[in-house]
Image (cartoon, helix red, strand yellow):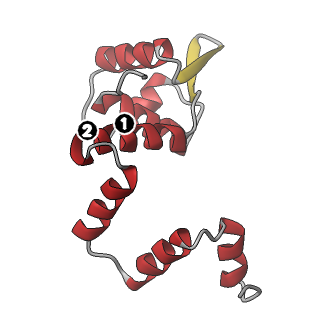
Amino acid sequence: MTEPLSDSELEAMRILWEESPLKPGQIQERFAWEIDNGTLRSTLAVLMTKGKVTRTKEGKAFLYAPAVERPSVLKSLAERLSRILTGGSTSDFVMELVRSEQFTPEQIQELQRIAAGESDATKGSEKRGNGK
C-alpha cells in the first residue's frame, strides 16, 4: 500500500495536474491557501521521494510535473476512504457520497451515463447530435 498524501501534497498535485511543468514559485502562487516557500519545497521533495512528481532543470530553476495520473491517485484515495468508512466497499462509499449530495439534472444524467457504462466518446457524439 502506498503512503497517503498530505493536504499540501494533494494541493501541489492538483495544481500540477491542471498545468505543468511549473517552477516552485508558480506552484506557490496557485495554492488555495498560503504556504511558505520552505514548506512547499519540502512538500515537493516528499512528492519526488514518493514518485508522484518529477523535476527537470531549466537554467537555474527546477520545473515540476506530475509523474502519476490524477485517476490513479483518486482511486487510491477512494479505496482508502472506503476501507475506513464502509468496510472496504468502494461502490457503497460512492453510493453514500451520491446520497449525501444535491445534484443538478445534468449531473444526474452524467451519473446515469457512467452507471450505464457509456464511454466519453459516446457522450461527445450525443452532445454533437450524432449519438443515440
**Which comes before the other along the chain, label 2 or label 1?**
1
Using the rendered view, name the quadrant where residue 118 is placed. Answer: bottom right
Using the rendered view, name the quadrant where residue 40 is placed. Answer: top left
Give the numbered dot on residue 33: 2
x, y percent for residue 44: 43, 19
Q: Nearer the viewer, residue 77 or 82?
A: 82
Q: Nearer the viewer, residue 132 or 103?
A: 132
Which image quarter is the C terminus in?
bottom right
Q: Secondary structure at mark 2?
A: loop
Q: Residues within 10 Å of mark 1 (few under 14, many from 20)?
A: some
Q: Are marks 2 and 1 in contact (CB under 8 Å)?
A: yes
x, y percent for residue 120: 65, 66
Q: Residue at x 55, y 41 (%)?
A: 19
Give the numbered dot on residue 84: none
Q: Residues within 10 Å of mark 2 (few under 14, many from 20)?
A: few
Q: CA distance from mark 2 to mark 1?
A: 9 Å
Q: Residue at x 60, y 68 (%)?
A: 117
Q: Label 1 is placed on what type of residue?
A: Glu
Reading the image, the residue beneath label 1 is 11
Of circles 2 and 1, the one toward us is: 1
Q: Nearer the viewer, residue 9 or 76?
A: 76
